[in-house]
Image: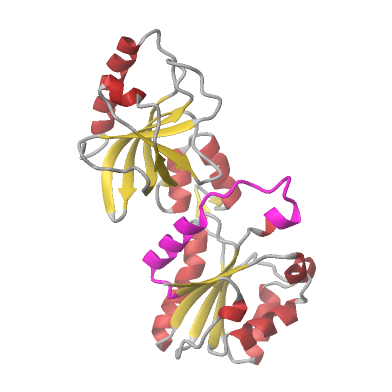
């Protein structure tokens, strides 16, 4: 998948382009529906589906003190788009000047920057341009004038409520993994680099990979049945989020992962992704290392039962 960082970088694709436009934080099932429309129509006309989104998220520019934590990193978003079959992604810088464009000027800029633009897919509530005055009704008119395909996909619901990034953030914070994963269409996950730790787990007989999270948001502290993605490989694992209170109270929260079976994999320095499949228990402080080891045995037994 091609990735460019401004409309001006777009080069000739030699094929019609159907563009899915939106913020797409988390790429939840509502976002996926909008993008799938672009993919399907592009296939119908022998074209290519592209995604237009923003980096940074508009909220980080408009109200940085109140901007919500992002569910996905840009890397996670790009990989997911590629797996969906998207041909390219435009990560447009969101600036004050960009925000001041009139909606019609924004649309004209899209058309001049992407000469092969043959259609646009958005969500029914998408707004754009100065004061967010552009909307699907205007896009219907503008696309019609150029004989372009246009789709405004209805909102998608989960448990009879509209799916939104806000709902997903709240579900992750509260540890409602089933709801968060259902709205995302995939498990909640964290991406980060494996770094050297204090080797406490190794001393207990259960070595762990210490991960520096890149995501803005993590599930609550505790033990989780999880999977660790290393490159294209998935490994069943136990994940711990907490402060290691049994040994000393860390000021910073840590994320550690213990692989259930593989022991000879060198993970240091690698970027990995932890997917949380099931909450096992909360973070606890134990009187001594022996009591902690006994609990680890019980935790691993519970986690193994999650996997077939």
Closer-to-camera residue (217/279): 217
Q: Is residue 149 above or below residue 206?
A: below
Q: Is residue 267 above or below residue 242?
A: below
Magenta span of residues: 60-87
Q: Position of residue 147 (x, y in %)?
A: 59, 92
Q: How many marks?
A: 0
**Image check: 291 left or right of 284?**
left
Q: Position of residue 155 (x, y in %)?
A: 56, 61
**Residue in view at x 74 percent, y 76 percent:** 103
- Find out whether residue 295 is within the magenta segment: no
Q: Is residue 127 above or below residue 185?
A: below
Q: Is residue 34 above or below residue 298?
A: below
Quadrant that contains the N terminus: bottom left
Closer-to-camera residue (148/11): 11
Q: Position of residue 238 (x, y in %)?
A: 32, 33
Quadrant that contains the C terminus: top left
**Image check: 236 left or right of 16?**
left
Outermost residue to the top: 287
Task: Answer yes or no: is residue 277 visible.
Answer: yes
- In this picture the colour scheme is secondary structure
- Find out whether residue 69 is within the magenta segment: yes
Closer-to-camera residue (105/162): 105
**Residue in view at x 63 percent, y 58 percent:** 57
Closer-to-camera residue (200/100): 200
**Residue in view at x 43 percent, y 75 percent:** 87
Q: Position of residue 111 (x, y in %)?
A: 62, 86
Task: Answer yes or no: is residue 141 visible.
Answer: no
């Amino acid at each position: 998948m091609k990735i460019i960082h401004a409309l001006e970088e777009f080069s000739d694709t030699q094929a019609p382009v159907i563009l899915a436009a939106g913020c797409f934080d988390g790429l939840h099932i509502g976002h996926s529906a909008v993008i799938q429309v672009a993919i399907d129509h592009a296939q119908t006309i022998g074209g290519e589906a592209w995604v237009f989104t923003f980096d940074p998220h508009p909220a980080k520019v408009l109200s940085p003190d109140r901007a919500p934590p992002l569910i996905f990193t840009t890397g996670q978003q790009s990989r997911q788009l590629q797996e969906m079959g998207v041909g390219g992604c435009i990560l447009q810088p969101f600036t004050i000047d960009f925000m001041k464009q009139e909606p019609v000027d924004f649309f004209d800029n899209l058309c001049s920057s992407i000469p092969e633009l043959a259609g646009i897919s958005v969500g029914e509530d998408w707004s754009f341009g100065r004061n967010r005055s552009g909307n699907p009704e205007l896009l219907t008119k503008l696309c019609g004038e150029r004989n372009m395909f246009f789709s405004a996909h209805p909102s998608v619901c989960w448990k009879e409520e509209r799916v939104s990034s806000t709902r997903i953030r709240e579900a992750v914070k509260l540890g409602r993994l089933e709801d968060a994963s259902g709205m995302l269409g995939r498990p909640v996950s964290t991406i980060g680099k494996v770094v050297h730790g204090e080797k406490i787990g190794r001393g207990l007989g259960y070595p762990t990979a210490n991960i520096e999270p890149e995501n803005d948001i993590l599930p609550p502290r505790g033990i989780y049945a999880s999977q660790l993605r290393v490159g294209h490989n998935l490994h069943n694992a136990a994940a711990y989020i907490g402060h290691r209170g049994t040994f000393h109270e860390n000021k910073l929260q840590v994320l550690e992962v213990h692989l259930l079976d593989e022991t000879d994999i060198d993970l240091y320095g690698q970027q990995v992704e932890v997917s949380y499949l099931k909450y096992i228990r909360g973070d606890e402080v134990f009187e001594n290392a022996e009591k902690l080891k006994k609990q680890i045995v019980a935790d691993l037994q519970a986690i193994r039962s999650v996997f077939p």
